[in-house]
Amino acid sequence: MENTAYLILENGQIFEGRRFGAVGDITGEIVFTTAMTGYLETLTDPSYYGQMVVQTFPLIGNYGVIPSDFESEKPRLKAYVVREWCQEPSNFRSEGVLDAFLKSHDIIGLYNIDTRALTKVIREYGVMNARITSSRDDPEASPEKLREYKITNAVKATSSKQAVTFKADNEKHRVVLWDFGAKENILRELKKRDCTVTVVPSDATADEIVSLKPDGVMLSNGPGDPAENTDVIKQIKKLCDTKIPLFGICLGHQLLALSQGAKTAKLKYGHRGANQPVTDTKDGRVYITSQNHGYAVVEDSLPDNAKMSFVNTNDGTSEGIDYTNMPAFSAQFHPEAAGGPLDTGFLFDRFISLMKEGR
């Protein structure tokens, strides 16, 4: 059929599906998310830059397209793979349908795929590259060609290009949000707590940030290999010496750890979804969190001034770090959720308390 397409994996397996969204052939890193809701937040999360996203939940698009739920101005992913997409959404807030949304942003979609079977393959084999193509014999889909694909310059591609300030109605704190591909809900959570927020691009320097006289600095989430960002890591290390309160989320968590001498490693298939359990190391309490990352801080590489505050309940990897020599902490998961549970929103309040203590 005319809209038939093939998803060819790096390991040679082929899944046949049908097209929706934009038409074309494309290569990317294929990952899956287990979130049952929040597909709009997934589509617009900058951390998916360069990736093909597979939804394990079978029906996507049933509440349409709602721009006020977006996490950035446009999708950054390479392609979107689902079992079934809803052509007639029902929601009083909906302003469009998924197919038209993907087409408007030139994002290729693929449906009628057995996403559960596909997810099992990714879990067993690990994250790999893949190609969506109209031909089973596409030379660009050979294992050798697929292995050549690599996500690079991801932070630079998704970060804001210039500083912008968002004034609080009742300003109590001034925060710099260092944008490595930040989600909008981080900004919303800070503004909700009476913070005037200045968003600065990824190539901002520590001196430029200090000159803004912030009460605290938020290190945002973002895409790609954290260790690739060597210049940013140097600037974070310099900023740490100022003792300005710092809070890192996801990529920000990893970059802060790297600035202190820790190491990061790529996970077999990452943590992506709104149902990821983490354990608080202080009291053993388990929180359900929203996550989207393919790398983790290596616990054995942590310096003496860094202590694990949260661990992943499933695999024991680092999910949070407290620093004992400076007012700084970080979380690998997303306390701002969007989409996901709000269990760990108290970490924003902890950041507010740090800023109050630093005055």
Image: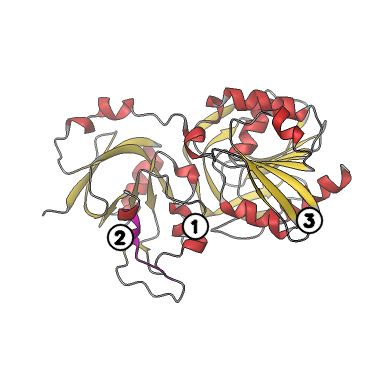
Q: Earlier in the sequence, mark 1 or mark 3?
A: 1
Q: Earlier in the sequence, mark 2 or mark 1?
A: 1
Q: Residues within 10 Å of mark 1 (few under 14, many from 20)?
A: many
Q: What residue lies at 64% left-to-right and 60% top-to-bottom?
A: 342
Q: Which residue is mark 3?
A: 171
Q: Which residues are magenta?
A: 94-102
Q: Residues within 10 Å of mark 2 (few under 14, many from 20)?
A: many
Residue drawn at (30%, 54%) of the image = 103
**Along the line of sight, the residue nearer the viewer: 7 or 247:** 247
Give the residue number, with chain letter if any, for mark 2: 99
Residue extending farthest left: 1
Is 284 in front, or is 167? 167
Between the C-alphas of marks 2 and 3, the distance is: 41 Å
How far apart are the two marked residues, 1 and 3, measured between alpha carbons? 25 Å
Is residue 311 located in the magenta-colored stretch of the structure? no
Label 2, secondary structure: give it.
helix
Q: Could you tell me which residue is drawn at 46 percent across and 72 percent down?
A: 93
| Residue tagged 1 | 70
* 336 to 357, vertically: above or below: below
Q: Earlier in the sequence, mark 2 or mark 3?
A: 2
Side of 223 relative to 165 (left or right): left
User: Which amino acid type is shown beneath numbered disc 1?
Assistant: Phe
Quadrant in the picture for residue 238: top right
Residue 59 placed where, x, y %? 36, 64
Q: Nearer the viewer, mark 2 or mark 3?
A: 3
Residue at coordinates 81% horizontally, 37% vertically from top-left? 327
Say which mark, if any, is on residue 24.
none
Q: Secondary structure at mark 3?
A: loop
